[in-house]
Image (tube, rainbow, N blue to C red):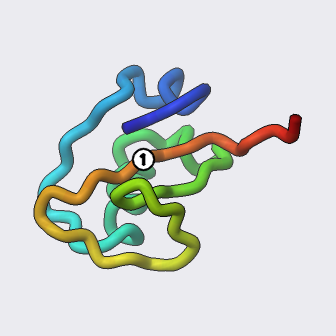
């Protein structure tokens, strides 16, 4: 799932990618397909858990690209 201004870059709020074994490979592939992501700030969540380091993706893992959160 893609949220916030990231949908302006990707032009969709859902993508299905196969063949990515971890979050680093996923981000590398997304940056190849959508070069504007190189300048975007976002965090990743895998199966509803925010991740800060490279994480192994299982078959059927759900990954979310989340824009920065603002305080409130």
Residue at the spot 57% in from the left edge and 72% down from the top edge: 52
In this rendering, is residue 46 above or below 16?
Answer: below
SS for dot 1: strand
Residue shown at 58%/27% (left/top)?
A: 4
Task: Find residue 72 and report its horizontal and vertical position in percent.
Answer: 88, 35
Q: Looking at the picture, how far across and down is residue 11, in whole percent?
A: 40, 21
Number of residue marks? 1
| x and y percentages locating residue 22 in the rendered image | 30, 73
Residue at left offset 48%, top offset 46%: 65
| Above or below, 9 relative to 48 | above
Mark 1 packing: few (<14 Cα in 10 Å), some, or many (20+)? many
Write the residue at 53% across / 62% down: 50
The N terminus, quarter of image: top left
The answer to whether residue 43 is above or below residue 35 is: below
Please name whichever residue, 4 or 28, is drawn nearer the observer in this view of the structure: 4
Q: Which residue is mark 1?
A: 64
Pick whichever, 2 or 11, lies toward us: 2
Q: Does residue 33 appear left or right of residue 7 in this picture? A: left
Image spot of residue 3 (x, y percent): 51, 32
Give left or right: position of 42 versus 28: right
């Amino acid at each position: 799932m893609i949220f916030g201004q990231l949908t302006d870059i990707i032009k969709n709020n859902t993508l299905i990618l196969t063949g990515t074994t971890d979050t680093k490979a996923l981000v590398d592939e997304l940056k190849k397909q959508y070069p504007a992501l190189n300048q975007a700030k976002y965090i990743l969540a895998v199966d509803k858990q925010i991740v800060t380091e490279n994480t192994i993706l299982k078959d059927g893992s759900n990954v979310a690209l989340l824009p920065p959160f603002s305080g409130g």
